[in-house]
Amino acid sequence: MNASQIVRRALALGAIVTVVIGIVAATLGALVAQLEGMLGALVGAGIGFALLGLTPVSIIWGFKLGKGDVLSPGFFAAVLGTWLVKFVVFLAAVFWLGDQAWLNATTLFLTIVASVLAGLVTDLVVVARSRMPYVDVSLPGDKPSE
């Protein structure tokens, strides 16, 4: 399994987890705060998925900028710059959408936090189970890697 496959798997599983969180949070939000709670949960799940989806995009973009070298400044600039953008988007969403009357701010905040935390756990599980080699070397008798 290469890094591109790991990133795609993390994105796919993150999307599934975010949809499940969105459904559960929308149901609970509707029970607690009627339509405003449901809308807050759905918007929060959407923002959570957008924040989750930026990580794989930044890694793929960083691989291209760093020409496949994860220790290059281009890779770090892409990934860390995207993390900064995610933080600003999170704060902007919480402060701007928190004042909107058409959604419940508490449900919105809790759903965003749950989606982001679930995305981090999903990424951790995917990477831990990826069986990605730590060292990229050719052993005698191996075919050359592309």
Image: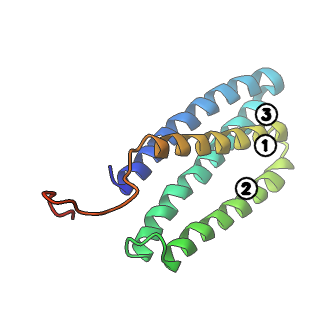
SS class of the residue under badge 2? helix
Q: Which mark is residue 70?
A: none
- The amino acid at mark 3 is Glu
Q: Which residue is mark 3?
A: 36
Give how far apart the Cα atoms at labels 2 and 3 are: 20 Å
Q: Residues within 10 Å of mark 2 (few under 14, many from 20)?
A: some
Rendered residue at 59%/46% (across/down): 49
Give how far apart the Cα atoms at labels 2 and 1 are: 10 Å
Left or right placement of residue 132 versus residue 30 in this view: left
Mark 2 or 3, nearer chain start? 3
Give how far apart the Cα atoms at labels 3 and 1 are: 13 Å
Mark 2 or 1, nearer chain start? 2
Q: Which residue is mark 2?
A: 90
For residue 25, which quarter of the picture?
top right
Verify CB contact (< 8 Å) between mark 3 and mark 1. Answer: no
In the displayed image of the protein, which residue is found farthest to the top? Answer: 31
Q: Residues within 10 Å of mark 1 (few under 14, many from 20)?
A: many
Q: Nearer the viewer, residue 49 or 101?
A: 49
- The amino acid at mark 1 is Phe
Mark 3 or 1, nearer chain start? 3
Q: Nearer the viewer, residue 129 or 46?
A: 129
Question: In the rendered picture of this protein, how many numbered marks are placed on residues?
Answer: 3
Q: Position of residue 140 (x, y in %)?
A: 16, 60
- The amino acid at mark 2 is Phe
Q: Which residue is mark 1?
A: 109
